[in-house]
Structures are given as C-alpha cells and as structure tokens.
Amino acid sequence: MLISEDLVGSLNEAVRVAHEDEFGALGRKLTRRGVDIEAVVARAMAWSVAVPTWGVGTGGTRFARFPGRGEPRNIHDKLADCGMIQQLTRGTRTVSPHIPWDKVSDYNALRQEAAQYGLGFDAVNSNTFQDQADQALSYRYGSLANARSDIRAQAVAHNLECIEIGKALGAPALTVWIGDGTNFAGQQSLSKMFENYLSAMEEVYAALPPGMAMFIEHKMYEPAFYSTVISDWGSSLMAAQALGPQAKCLVDLGHHAPNVNIEQIVARLVHVGRLAGFHFNDSKYGDDDLDSGSVDPFRLFLVFNELVEAELRGAKGFAPSYMIDQSHNVTDPIESLMGSAVEIARAYVQASLVDRKALAEAQEANDVMAAHRTLKAGFLTDVSPILAEARMRQGGAYDPIAAYRASGYRGRVAQERPEVKGSSSGIV
Ligand code: LRH
Ligand code: MN
C-alpha cells in the first residue's frame, strides 16, 4: 500500500453517516424505478479502466511542457503512481505501457512488480512516430506506410518486438497508432501509402500469437496536416477486415472532427464485431487529450449507452478494452487520472440505469420525447453514492483526490525524484 489504509479508513469514516444517508436515498429512488441498487453497485465494483503509463508524467504540447514536482523517471515510478491511483479508486486494475518509453530488460520482473500494486497490463502501444537515438532509419516521412521498404521493415521489426514484450507482460493486445501521412497534396500517393501500410501490417499480424489482438487506432490529423493514412474508422475497419479476425478498431475519443457522432461509430463497430476498445479523454477542438468528462460528459454517457446496450444484448464479439489516453499539462496527473477514472465509471453506471424496456417501447412507438427522456434519465441520475460505495467496499477512498492530497504522496515522491528543470516540448 502506497498510503496507509488507516488514513483512508479514517477519511471514509468521517463522511460515513452522510454517505449512508445519500446512498440510502438513492437506493429508495432506484427501488421506485424497479432497480436494485446492490446490483448496480456490483457492476460498479466490477468495472475497471486501464491507465496509460505515459499519463502519470506531466504532458505538453508542441509549444512547451512544464514538468511538475516528483515527475516519474521511469516505468518503476510510473507503476508506483498507477498503484496509488488503483489503491484509492479501485477501478484501474491495469496499465497500458508504451514502447520504448517503458522499455526494461526483464519484463517478467516488471509483471511481478506491477502485481505488487494489484496491477496487470492492458494493450502494449508501439511507437514509430518518433526516432530513437539508436535507430538506423528515420520515420520523418512515415513508418509502416513509408515509400521506402527498408523503413517499413524497421517499423515492422519494432512491432514484432512489442508483440514479444506483450507476451511477457500477459497483455491482451498490441495497439498500433501511426502518425504517417502528408502535409502537401502530391507529397505521396494516398492509395500507395495505404497499400504499403497493409502489406507491412500483414507481417505484424502474422506474428500475433493466438488470443492476442491487434488494435488499429485511427486519427483524423496530427502530426500530419494534409492526409493521414488511417484517418477515420472507415480506413481502420478496411484494414482490420483485410488483415483478419484478431484485428480490431480502437476509438480514441479525441481523434475525430468536432461534433462527429462518435457513439454511432461505436454502434457500427459493434455491429461488425470489430470494436477493439477506447482511449478515453475529452476535447473541444482537436486531439486535446483533456480529462474524460471535463468538456462534454453527456457525449461520454452516450458512448456508454451504446456499450451497455451492446453488452446487455450480448452483441457478437463484444469484449472491448477500456483505456484512458490523456495529457495532463496543468494538473497533477495522478489527480486527473483518478478524477477521470471516476467520471468514466460514472458514465458506465448512468448508462446501466437506463430503462431499456421503456426506451425500446418508446422507440417502437416513435414517441420521440418519451424515448429521449427515458435515455436522459440515466444521465440525470447522480450516481456518486454508488461510485463511492463501490470504491469503499473494495478498500478505496470515498474521495480519492482528497485522500491523495491528505497522504502527502506528491511531496514524498518529490523528495525522492530529482526536480526536472526548464520546459521542453512534446506530449511526454
Ligand atoms: C496518438 C495517441 C496514441 C498514443 C499517443 C500517446 O495521438 O492517441 O494513442 O500512442 O497518443
Ligand atoms: Mn490514443
């Protein structure tokens, strides 16, 4: 335990009477709706979202990155910070690593180290969007879709290495996001780049062990600003269907144009059994990587409405991976990740409260207002008591951020981890 259980216990005890009153009131309210609050608490307790290892360090933009106190220096510090998040939220049981940012010599030891914090590993992310110091060929003009076969081969080799790392960590999947694209019309053939990408990905796909999935992550733009090889769910789905059944489409909420109906993209990918999962965050303009639910919590709820509906009807091949992917430029990353884990669990629980029978009846009857109000009733229910109860029953905190602050953890690690002076730039 990274902070004393007694501290968490005493903080929870201080609010127990008020919490039990609110929990009781919500229970009675749900009973009047024919919903058993204990069944919902059980769903909330079973819920979990993966934390990105790169998310516990302060993030930045192309203009600047302003490191905070006690920045994690390596994967070992990152696992400790992720352990802290799990200890207080009890809803982030896995971490999603990024290679080579999290490279070590012994992945079995890393797996055990994570297990000490009650953590396992979700999808491993490859990285052919940066050049490493020891790299022979540059990805300046692309990686898996590069016009040059030797550069594509280098990118394939990196992904094969990530598959081996994934096997050692017990990861369920390899996530492949590439920034490949162009900044000028004519710079490259839009068709040839896609064909190059497919032939390179076939080699990566062929190396997947049975049971390991390949998550293809689309993104509309950035770092390329005229065309991006895998720019939308259509290109991602075409690639997944061309590669094989272990290839699926990962939806990063920030990778779409403003106002795109992402919940409908989710419904379509569920329909064809190719929904890999999510990179949760929020955004107002571009790939802002803001905290989940901090800009448009109703949109997050609508995405979960599709997910819960698919889960309850037993949609074929429905087993998405839920992961966070955010950049914490002005907050303590641990606080942002805990807050986001709570807001994502909130959307899941709210969507679980939707009266699906009443909704289907109103939809059948084309009773538009009844249908919309039935759906929105889930969103308008304050499920905070259920989320807090689910955390506390598992040894977590009534208020994770308050407990974290009371623990003095940041101050403590700031002593151990040398201060990072000056500001650099970039996402990590
Ligand atoms: C690309 C992306 C991808 C990660 C990176 C850190 O924007 O969402 O998922 O590899 O961020
Ligand atoms: Mn992402």
Image (cartoon, rainbow, N blue to C red):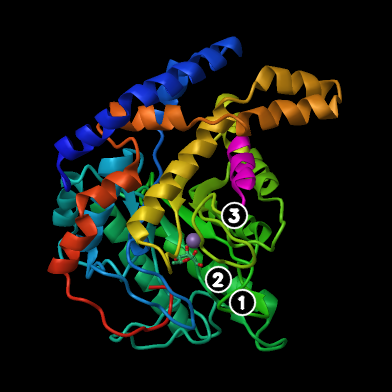
Number of residues whose C-alpha sits closer than 10 Å to that of mark 1, classed few (under 14), some (14–19) or many (20 or more):
many
Residue 271 - label: none
* Residue displayed at 51% across by 48% down: 276
Badge 1 marks a residue whose secondary structure is helix
Q: Mark 1–mark 2 contact, CB under 8 Å?
A: yes
Q: Would residue 359 be seen by someone viewing this image from the given angle?
A: yes
Tell me which segment is drawn in magenta. Answer: 296-305
Label 2 lies in ligand 1 vicinity (Cβ under 8 Å): no
For the residues labelled 3 and 2, the Cα–Cα distance comes to 34 Å
Type of residue at label 1? Met
Residue 193 - label: 1
Question: Mark 1 or mark 3: which comes first in sequence?
Answer: 1
Label 3 lies in ligand 2 vicinity (Cβ under 8 Å): no
For the residues labelled 1 and 3, the Cα–Cα distance comes to 35 Å
Q: Mark 3–mark 2 contact, CB under 8 Å?
A: no
Q: In this picture, is 157 found above or below 10?
A: below
Residue 197 - label: 2
Badge 3 marks a residue whose secondary structure is loop
In this view of the protein, which residue sits in the foreground, 274 or 131? Answer: 131
For the residues labelled 1 and 2, the Cα–Cα distance comes to 6 Å
* Residue displayed at 69% across by 63% down: 257
* Secondary structure that dominates the magenta span: helix
In this view of the protein, which residue sits in the foreground, 76 or 169? Answer: 76
Q: Is residue 80 left or right of residue 297?
A: left
Q: Residue furthest right?
A: 366
Residue tagged 3: 295
Task: Find residue 56 and report its image quarter.
Answer: bottom left
Task: Find residue 336 and report its image quarter.
Answer: bottom left
Query: What is the quadrant of the N terminus in the image?
Result: top left
Question: Mark 3 or mark 2: which comes first in sequence?
Answer: 2
Q: Is residue 415 left or right of residue 17?
A: left
